[in-house]
Image (spheres, grey):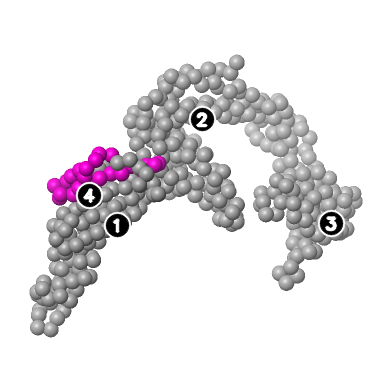
Amino acid sequence: MSRARRARTRGGAMSPGAASGLEVNVIEGERCRRTLEVSAPAEFVDRERVAATRKYASRMKMKGFRKGRVPPSVIDKRFGRAIEEEAVERAVRKACDEAISTRELRPVDNVDVTDVRYRPGEPLTFKAVFDAWPEVPTGRLGGFRVERPPVEVPEGAVDRIIERLRGEQAVWDAAENGRPETGNAVTVVMTRLDGDEGGGDASRQYDLILGEGQALPDIEDAIRTLTTGDEGDFDITFPDDFPDESRRGASHKVRIALLSRSVPRLPEVDDAFARSVGNFEDLGELRSRVGEDLEREARSQAETEVNNRLMRMVVEANAFEIPDTMVDRYTDAMLSEAEDMEPEQLEGLRKELRPASEFAVRRDLLASRITEEHGLHAASEEVDAQLEAVARERGEPVGRVRARLRKSGALEALERRLTDAKLFRFLREQSEITEAS
């Protein structure tokens, strides 16, 4: 049984539309599915038939008549069936648009027209099926209690940043003796021994840094057994958590040749090092600035989490249906870069992502409704102030900054960020934000 047949009918009899004499019955299906049963008077088609006949007459050339002067009866005799089909098609299109407009509905996507019935002199009837834009409630926007997560900089985080900065300034020295270790840079040639020999050259050269996850664990372990100039044959197995499910657990025989090995020579962590990586007086100032940046980032993450928790509460307090079309479109956008996956994998991932997609669509619709209802869009003066600040920082004219941001799409992103900031300020004012105990 179709969704439309299961759905309840709002209003019993056909209700008239505009002065055109349309009668429209709306059948409400699940998840914003709407079916319009439309009846248009015969005159609706007659008007389109006259217009179609005139169009044919204006273009037709016939011996004995001047162009555009062929009598309608002659036109109808020769092109009657085509004229009627065109008249019905145009009448259906106009009646459908009017029916949707008079019932104040907004299709999310294309409208599917079915069951078209018409006989000359009788009403034109058809069904129009589509997903309608959902009605978004804003019943409860406040009164929530949201706990701010603690602001914590992980232990050792400053040291890890310092080590990363050292790595960026490392000097790489070639090492002829010894076996590769974690942190070494290696150049290897790998040859698949059990591949398709007709598939071309199976050997490829790679530059890797061991320990950074740039190669499979079995490959890195194999490289660690070699010395420069050596090669060996190894059985390599793909791990169980490999992204491509079809290759998990698969094994291949590979020949690996170690062409070179380099060892990083790291700078000493002292005042000179601090001055070399930025505008710092000494190592103490560098460590202090790194710590401040990490704390600032942690505070920003905590505030983002407050916003996420608050928005989830708002969404859960204002339940409403959303059409499958919107959820599918959002999921498709998330999977836009997964086209190379196998169909079965793609479908499994689509099902896995559906709950997140549904929540995201509800969140976006509700945020948009709140923004509109309470006038929270970023004002032009607020955008101008941000642009002026950027222009001052970069020493450029405001007009040039605006043009560049508009061309790259960053101006729209800036307006969206300012709007989101106003939205969450508004929502926070309606609720209580507490500190973690």
Q: CA–CA distance between discs 4 and 3?
A: 72 Å
Residue 91 seen by the camera: yes
Q: CA–CA distance between discs 3 and 2?
A: 48 Å
Q: Which mark is residue 234?
A: 3
Query: Local crowd at mark 2 within 10 Å, few (<14), some, or many (≥20)?
Result: some
Query: Local crowd at mark 4 within 10 Å, few (<14), some, or many (≥20)?
Result: some
Who comes first in sequence, dot 1 or dot 3?
1
Give how far across and how far down residue 410 sits, in percent. Answer: 45, 43
Viewer-closest of 411 and 129: 129
Give how far across and how far down residue 425 sits, in percent. Answer: 43, 25
Q: Residue under label 1, please give it.
A: 115
Q: As displayed, is residue 299 above or below residue 252?
A: above
Question: Magenta span covers which residues?
Answer: 10-33
Q: Quadrant of the C terminus?
A: top right
Q: Residue under label 4, please give it.
A: 98
Q: As displayed, is residue 114 above or below residue 197?
A: above
Who comes first in sequence, dot 2 or dot 1?
1
The quarter of the displayed image where residue 204 is located: bottom right
